[in-house]
Image: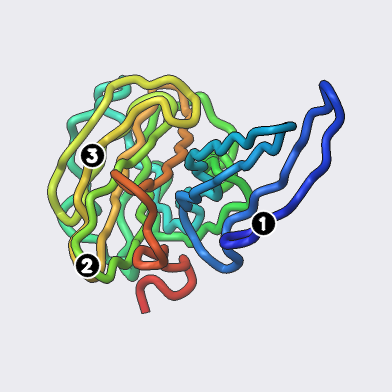
């Protein structure tokens, strides 16, 4: 059942009903849908109202650079590398094993697995992942994160949050942010003492839904 549609279903005693609810086609992000159910019984009618959150707003278009040395050997390495000062996707940097640059990566699911780019390694290291979102107006949001093991967030040029360790699970941490009107840049620093670096990030509205006013920019076009 889509937005603004209604269905009538006849039920017998003890018969469950299942109604499929879909987000509007082509809309990115979680959508807050009002749902009303009218239950007609002999001699009376019961009206039930609620709201459902459908859809998702995971970041799936990334540009990634690494690997850099993890000099501290833990999940909160404090060494600052050039991407933290300025995101220049044409730049190359001195990394582990030689020069490293930025590579676009479009996900087929919700997890950024850095072994996809760097292979499987047990060596400690640091990598950077950047994504961009456009907002039509200033918008309060909640960033829902999962990562393994440590991560820092530089949002629109400001370091706003970090964790030395985190559960490798969707929605393990929630970070309140306010998107500015226009371009918003999320730069994640992923640190690992054992080579296993992964990240999932979903941007959800603080209340209601985005209404089409917040959209991700694809990795292929983000920096042209």
Q: Nearer the viewer, residue 142 or 201?
A: 142
Q: CA distance from mark 3 to mark 1?
A: 35 Å
Q: CA distance from mark 1 to mark 2?
A: 33 Å
Residue 176's disc is 3
Q: Quadrant of residue 86?
A: bottom left
Q: At 41% from the left edge and 67% from the top edge, which residue is drawn? A: 212
Q: Which residue is mark 1?
A: 6
Q: Position of residue 145 (x, y in %)?
A: 39, 35
Q: At 18% from the left edge and 31% from the top edge, which residue is drawn? A: 78
Which SS class for mark 1?
Answer: loop
Q: Which residue is mark 2?
A: 137
| Comparing labels 1 and 2, the label whose residue is closer to the camera | 1
**Res 216 seen here:** yes
Q: Nearer the viewer, residue 161 or 69?
A: 161
Please state, as top left, top right, bottom left or bottom right, where the C terminus lies in the image: bottom left
Q: Position of residue 89 (x, y in %)?
A: 33, 66
């Amino acid at each position: 059942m889509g937005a603004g549609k209604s269905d009538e279903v006849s039920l017998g005693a003890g018969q469950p009903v299942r109604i499929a609810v879909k987000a509007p086609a082509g809309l990115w992000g979680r959508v807050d849908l009002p749902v009303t159910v009218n239950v007609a019984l002999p001699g009376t009618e019961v009206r039930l109202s609620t709201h459902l959150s459908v859809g998702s707003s995971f970041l799936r278009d990334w540009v990634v650079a690494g690997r850099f040395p993890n000099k501290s050997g833990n999940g909160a390495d404090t060494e600052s590398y050039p991407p933290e000062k300025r995101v220049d996707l044409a730049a190359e940097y001195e990394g582990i094993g030689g020069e490293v640059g930025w590579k676009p990566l479009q996900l087929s699911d919700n997890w950024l697995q850095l072994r996809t780019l760097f292979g499987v390694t047990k060596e400690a290291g640091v990598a950077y992942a950047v994504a961009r979102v456009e907002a039509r107006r200033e918008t309060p949001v909640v960033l829902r994160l999962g990562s393994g093991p440590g991560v820092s967030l530089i949002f629109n040029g400001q370091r706003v949050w970090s964790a030395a360790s985190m559960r490798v699970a969707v929605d393990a941490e929630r970070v309140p942010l306010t998107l500015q009107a226009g371009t918003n840049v999320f730069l994640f620093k992923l640190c690992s003492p054992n080579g296993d670096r992964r990240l999932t990030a979903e941007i959800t509205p603080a209340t209601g839904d985005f209404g089409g006013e917040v959209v991700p920019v694809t990795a292929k076009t983000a920096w042209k």
